[in-house]
Image (spheres, rainbow, N blue to C red):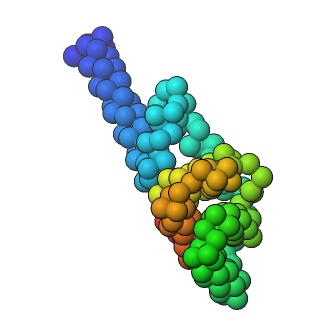
Amino acid sequence: MSTGTLLAIVIPVAVVLVLIGVAVALFMRRRHLRERFGPEYDRTMEDADSPAAGQRDLKAREKRHDALDIKPLEEGRRESYQHDWDGVQQEFVDRPEAAVHDADRLVTSLMQERGYPTEDFEQRLKDLSVEHGSTLKHYREAHEIDALSKQHRAGTEQLRGAMTHYRALFDELLSNGGQSRHARA
């Protein structure tokens, strides 16, 4: 067999193997991001200009999150937060709007104590998305209802829903213990 014939066979085979390797790597990267971010993966991809831009955004979130000092709560602090939450729920009976505002403040306080920056709501969402993507929908909806209630435009049923939504994130933040899914895997 001549060298030209060998090259004509080896080069296309090598190109196909490289393309297969690239496709597998891209699939694995997408799968990793989809598993880590849950529903937030789809939301980010829909909002992004391109799949590559969406994936860059998610990777940047991972990098920022990994640099944060997310820590577990001591048992006494967890019990204190649970006690505070129970009080907020009891407050709902007589003062639903105030209870929703207090729930928002309590969730923000819990996030801050765990090590999440809390200055900007959109950044909070991005930081939480890395470990708590499955509960971000709850947090967004609760935050929207809280904003409506500050204008006295939320009904009692909406306020009840906000409490349920805040509770979903609260429970996850409280029970996570600071263990990153990424670190446990």
Residue at 64% from the left image edge and 64% from the top image edge = 97
Q: Residue 15 in the image: x percent, y percent?
A: 35, 24
Judging depth in this view, the residue of 7 and 150 nearest the camera is 150
**Total label count?**
0
Q: Can residue 62 be seen in this view?
A: no
Question: Which residue is the extreme one toward the right?
Answer: 119
Q: Residue 69 in the image: x percent, y percent?
A: 73, 64
Is 141 placed left or right of 78 in the picture?
A: left
Q: Residue 123 in the image: x percent, y percent?
A: 68, 47
Judging depth in this view, the residue of 97 and 62 nearest the camera is 97
Q: Can residue 43 be seen in this view?
A: yes
In the displayed structure, 137 sits above or below 53; it is below
Quadrant containing the N terminus in the rendered view: top left
Residue at 66% from the left image edge and 56% from the top image edge = 66
In the displayed structure, 88 sits above or below 103; it is below
Q: Residue 103 in the image: x percent, y percent?
A: 64, 68
Residue at 75% from the left image edge and 57% from the top image edge = 117
Residue at 71% from the left image edge and 65% from the top image edge = 105
Quarter-of-image position of residue 110: bottom right
Judging depth in this view, the residue of 124 and 145 nearest the camera is 145
Is 95 placed left or right of 7 in the picture?
A: right
Quarter-of-image position of residue 12: top left
